[in-house]
Amino acid sequence: MERKFWLERWLKNQIGFHQPEYNRHLQTYWPGLGIEKGSRVFIPLCGKSLDMRWLESQGHSVCGVEISKVAIEAYFESHNEDYRRTVVGDFTLYSGLNSEIYCGDFFELTARELQGVAGVYDRGALIALPQDMRVRYIDHLLRVLPEGTRMLLLTLEYDQNLVAGPPFSVYPEEIEALYGDRCNIERLHTDVTDQVPPHFAAQGVNRVGEAAYRITKLS
């Protein structure tokens, strides 16, 4: 899951992971996080997710990070929204009316870029990464987020032996191992869906588990 892999996916428009509508679990469980309107919300590896538009509609200012400028520019241009670009450290910062997206490597983010963040929405970041990178991803995320940040995490659960990710399968035991030492974890939801990625269906995987977690950074 190197930089080149994701850049090529966006250049070739191989983005089956992109959802053409708001995520139903986001709409159901986000209000329960109790994050006030006007608060800054972070979306890691955000792509051009429509969920950012939903978060904006709830009165939040959105902050994302994404490796592909193709994805970022598509986010703004698909809604005819003007944006400006500035260089901020190792990033190019795209700024719109209620959103800022850092174009660059997630692992170069510092606490400075995420200052004031009160919430995190992760639908496609953790499950996009293989296991060794998930460990590094969560360690870095928790280093740079402010104390008390509340997160909505969505994951998939399926037999990884049946099909290779991404998206990858992440079970509750791994969530506990990744977040447990520094966070409070609450499993909000679990069910089964037949809305699977095309390459899953092509290999005979027609149903996967979906889970939602509320996670609060303690320190």
Image (spheres, rainbow, N blue to C red):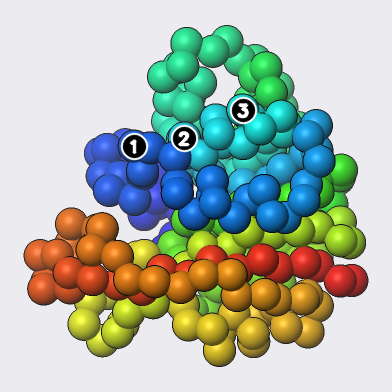
Quadrant in the picture for the N terminus: bottom left
For mark 3, what is the residue? 57
Q: Nearer the viewer, mark 3 or mark 1?
A: 3
- For residue 82, above or below residue 210: above
Q: Secondary structure at mark 3?
A: helix
Q: CA distance from mark 1 to mark 2?
A: 7 Å
What's under tag 2, amino acid-wise? Answer: Leu
How packed mark 1 is, by other alpha carbons closer than 10 Å (few <14, some 14-19, many 20 or more), is: few
Residue 111 placement (x, y as % from top left): 84, 52
Q: Residue at x 86, y 44 (%)?
A: 115
- In primary-sequence order, the first of circles 1 and 2 is 1
Residue 41 placement (x, y as % from top left): 72, 43
- In primary-sequence order, the first of circles 3 and 1 is 1
How packed mark 2 is, by other alpha carbons closer than 10 Å (few <14, some 14-19, many 20 or more), is: some
Indicate the quadrant where residue 216 lies. Answer: bottom right
Residue 144 placement (x, y as % from top left): 80, 58
Q: Residue at x 81, y 57 (%)?
A: 149
Query: 73 or 89, which is in the foreground?
Result: 73
Proximity of marks 1 and 2: CB atoms separated by less than 8 Å: yes
Q: Secondary structure at mark 1?
A: loop
- For residue 186, above or below residue 198: below
For mark 2, what is the residue? 50
Query: Label for residue 60?
Result: none
- In primary-sequence order, the first of circles 3 and 2 is 2
Query: 215 or 125, which is in the foreground?
Result: 215
Q: Secondary structure at mark 2?
A: loop
Q: Nearer the viewer, mark 3 or mark 2?
A: 3
- For residue 140, above or below residue 10: below
For mark 1, what is the residue? 20
Q: In screen coordinates, is 116 left or right of 209?
A: right
* Residue 126 shows in the view: no
